[in-house]
Amino acid sequence: MGCGREVLIGVRYCGGCNPSYDRTEAVEALAREIGFKPVRYDNPGIVALVVVCGCPTSCPLEKDERGTSCPTFVMRGEEDVAEARNWLAALLRGP
């Protein structure tokens, strides 16, 4: 998806008050496997956003500070990591 440039994926983490999995490791593993650079969700160069919640409460969804219109995926738990992998891979593959 681009001419050798790093693909930037914005990541918005929850506050981590009750995580059921290692959110940071999940994102780092996805980045390694798929080949993107995870950056803050408010970075103007992102092509997509992954909202990483530690539990089903999904606190980050209560406030959208960026008002993004880019493609967004919400991970609510470890069970969503495989779906996030598929979503990101398809997104970066393009049409």
Image (cartoon, rainbow, N blue to C red):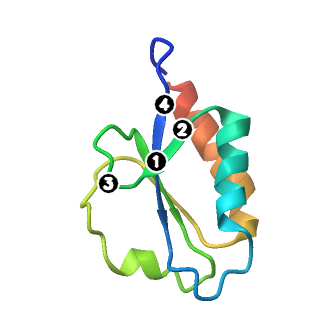
Residue under the image location 68 percent in, 46 percent down: 30
Q: CA distance from mark 4 to mark 1?
A: 10 Å
4 vs 1, front mark: 1
Helix, strand or loop under label 2: strand
Q: Which residue is mark 1?
A: 39
For the residues labelled 4 and 1, say whether their Cβ atoms are less than 8 Å apart.
no
Q: Is residue 63 left or right of residue 5?
A: left
Q: Which mark is residue 37?
A: 2
For the residues labelled 3 and 4, say whether their Cβ atoms are less than 8 Å apart.
no
Residue under the image location 41 percent in, 53 percent down: 40
Q: Which amino acid type is marked by label 4?
A: Val
- Looking at this rendering, what residue extends furthest in the top direction? 3
Q: Which mark is residue 7?
A: 4
Q: CA distance from mark 1 to mark 2?
A: 6 Å
Residue under the image location 73 percent in, 68 percent down: 22
Q: Which mark is residue 31?
A: none
Q: Position of residue 10 (x, y in %)?
A: 44, 50
Q: Position of residue 94 (x, y in %)?
A: 51, 26
Count of numbered tags: 4
> What is the crowding at mark 3: few (fewer than 14 residues within 10 Å), some, or many (at least 20)?
some
Q: In the figure, 23 relative to 26: above or below?
A: below
Q: Position of residue 91 (x, y in %)?
A: 53, 36
Q: Which residue is mark 3?
A: 42
